[in-house]
Each structure stands twice: as C-alpha cells, then as structure tokens.
Image (tube, rainbow, N blue to C red):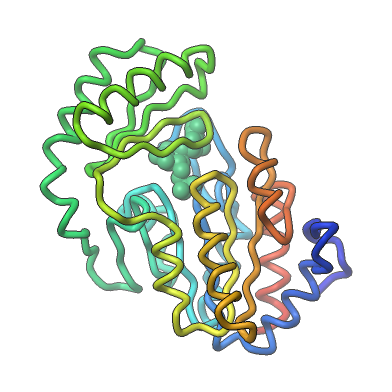
C-alpha cells in the first residue's frame, strides 16, 4: 500500500486506515466488509436513477470479495437495483434496510412480514405524487417510499409534515436521510439488525457509510466488539455536507469522498492479492 495518505483517524482513537488494513489483511478470511451504497460507493446526484459506483471501488469490491470472508452491500435501495449497479461481483446484497436480501447468485428473499404492506406503499406513492409539490421526487421502492427534496430544500418542512402525518395515519415508520424522508413498513429490520446478525461468527468487520441510517450499523459493530474484545471492528465514514459531521463523529476513520474511498479500496485489494 502507499504511505498513510488515506482517511482521517479520530483524535481520540489512534487508528489510521493503513494500519487498520494491515491488521485486517492478516486475518482476511475472518473478515466481512460492509458497504452502504449511496454517498459511500456512489457519489450523490439529483437523480437517484442516475448514480453509479465509483469505478475503482467497483473493481476493488470484486477483488476483495475473493480474499475476505464476505463482502456485503447494506442499503435502502432494492436488491434488484444493487445487483444492477454491482454487476457480477460475488457479494451479499441487503436491500430496503434488510427487508430484502440475496447472497451471491441466489434468489432475492423478502421478509415475509413486510409483504402485506406492498399495496399500501404503492397507494402511498400515488398519493405523494398527487398531493406534494411537483418539485418533490417520489421514489417508489415496492416496500418503501422515499420523498426527495434535494432540488427543493425549502420544501423540507412540508415533506416532513406530510410524511409524518401519513406515517401516523398508516402505522408506518420513518427514516430521515440526506435530503430525503423515507416511509417504510413497521417491520423490525434496519442496518443495525442486519450487521448484528451478519457479524455473529466473524472475527473482523469494517462498515463504510455516510448517512444517519448507518449509525445503527456502527453501533452493532461496537456492540460486537464490546462483547468480544478479540473481534476487530472498524467504522468508516464518507464525508458530506449534510450528515457528514454526525457520521464522522461516530466513526474511527473518515474518507473525503466516494472517490477517495475507491482509491483506498483499490490499494487495499492490491495488498492482499
Ligand atoms: O442506504 P443507502 O444506499 O445510502 O440509500 C439511502 C438513500 O439513497 C438514495 O438517496 C440519496 O442518493 C440520491 C442519489 O445520489 C440523492 O438524490 C438523494 O438526495 C439521497 O438521499 C436513494 O434514492 C434513497 O432511496 C435511499 O433511501
């Protein structure tokens, strides 16, 4: 690997990306690498359908999947979307906060408790399009609806009022994010629960994220490490002007952008080939 030019460590935790990766490379077959998608692997854009992972991150994920125990993407996006963007890489995909998952070339499995909510979510998306201002982008994802105000930030309050009232009326849960409010079924799946289950038998894990929903994943890694000091967990933030401060404050390391993360991953993959 190149010199220590990757990531910024926290002042109160003496860890840098290179030394943490060296510890990981020594036990690669025990290690799981978890990646959030938007804002972490893929730079943010106004149009959610237009985003693609940074090319170096994509090729590094493919290479890393061959040398670590497992690579997983943990996202609010549907599994089909993630599969399309990740290509043929042999990875686990947890979509819609874990309401869907697929492993390698296996089928996509949906959490059974969420399935009865499909019609209500479709109806909610239709009403959001009819009742919210045209500037609000309504993203229907079968088991959740995201209300985007990135191109009209002055409408954040209106989106929050409408979304919270609908959640209350229908018994849904909400998740805030980067210029987005999401409504989802009242089913106990989130990134923290996904990570808690997936690291149970691992000896080492890294989680890379940029948004507030990723904080639960960080907490799950911390919890795993507290219960077993031999477990090596690394929480990594990707900086951004919206949620970056909160996420970096909870992380061990911070990268400046998805591109900077891609460079690190590329070097990391090369060091264990
Ligand atoms: O869990 P993630 O993979 O991080 O997904 C979180 C949300 O990501 C997407 O929205 C975000 O990225 C968009 C494209 O860059 C951007 O336009 C938007 O402002 C961001 O919030 C996705 O569209 C959402 O469904 C996810 O909830």
Quadrant for the N terminus in the image: bottom right
Residue at 28%, 58% in the rendered image: 100
Residue at 63%, 59% in the rendered image: 56
Q: Residue 151, how many percent across, how many down?
A: 51, 19
Q: Residue 255, how many percent across, how many down?
A: 73, 53
Res 268 quadrant in image: bottom right
Residue at 33%, 18% in the rendered image: 162
Q: Is residue 50 visible?
A: no
Res 146 quadrant in image: top left
Above or below: residue 190 compared with residue 19? above
Q: Residue 171, how many percent across, how many down?
A: 22, 36
Task: Tell me: 85 left or right of 233.
Answer: left
Res 67 quadrant in image: bottom right
**Badge count:** 0
Task: Tell me: 178 left or right of 15.
Answer: left
Quadrant for the C terminus in the image: bottom right
Task: Tell me: 226 left or right of 133.
Answer: right
Q: Is residue 126 visible?
A: yes
Q: Residue 250, how many percent across, how many down?
A: 66, 53
Task: Tell me: 196 left or right of 212.
Answer: left
Q: Residue furthest toward the right? A: 3
Residue at 55%, 79% in the rendered image: 227
Please name whichever residue, 181 or 222, is drawn nearer the observer in this view of the structure: 222
């Amino acid at each position: 690997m190149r010199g220590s030019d990757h990531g910024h460590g926290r002042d109160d935790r003496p860890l840098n990306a290179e030394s943490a990766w060296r510890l990981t490379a020594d036990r690669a077959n025990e290690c799981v690498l978890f990646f959030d998608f938007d804002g972490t692997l893929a730079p943010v854009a106004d149009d959610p359908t237009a985003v693609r992972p940074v090319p170096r991150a994509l090729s590094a994920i493919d290479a890393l999947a061959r040398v670590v125990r497992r690579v997983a993407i943990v996202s609010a996006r549907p599994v089909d979307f993630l599969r399309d963007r990740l290509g043929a890489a042999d990875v686990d995909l947890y979509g819609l906060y874990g309401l869907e998952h697929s492993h390698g070339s296996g089928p996509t499995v949906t959490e059974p408790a969420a399935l009865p909510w499909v019609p209500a979510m479709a109806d909610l998306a239709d009403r959001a399009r009819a009742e919210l201002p045209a500037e609000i982008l309504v993203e229907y994802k079968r088991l959740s609806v995201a209300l985007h105000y990135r191109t009209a930030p002055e409408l954040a309050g209106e989106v929050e009022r409408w979304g919270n009232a609908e959640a209350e009326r229908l018994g849904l849960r909400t998740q805030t994010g980067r210029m987005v409010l999401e409504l989802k079924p009242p089913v106990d799946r989130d990134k923290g629960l996904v990570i808690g289950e997936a690291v149970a038998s691992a000896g080492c894990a890294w989680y890379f994220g940029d948004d507030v929903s990723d904080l639960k994943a960080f907490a799950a890694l911390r919890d795993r490490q507290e219960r077993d000091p031999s477990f090596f967990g690394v929480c990594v933030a990707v900086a951004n002007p919206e949620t970056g401060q909160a996420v970096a404050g909870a992380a061990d390391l911070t990268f400046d952008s998805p591109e900077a993360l891609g460079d690190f991953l590329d070097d990391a993959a090369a060091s264990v080939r």
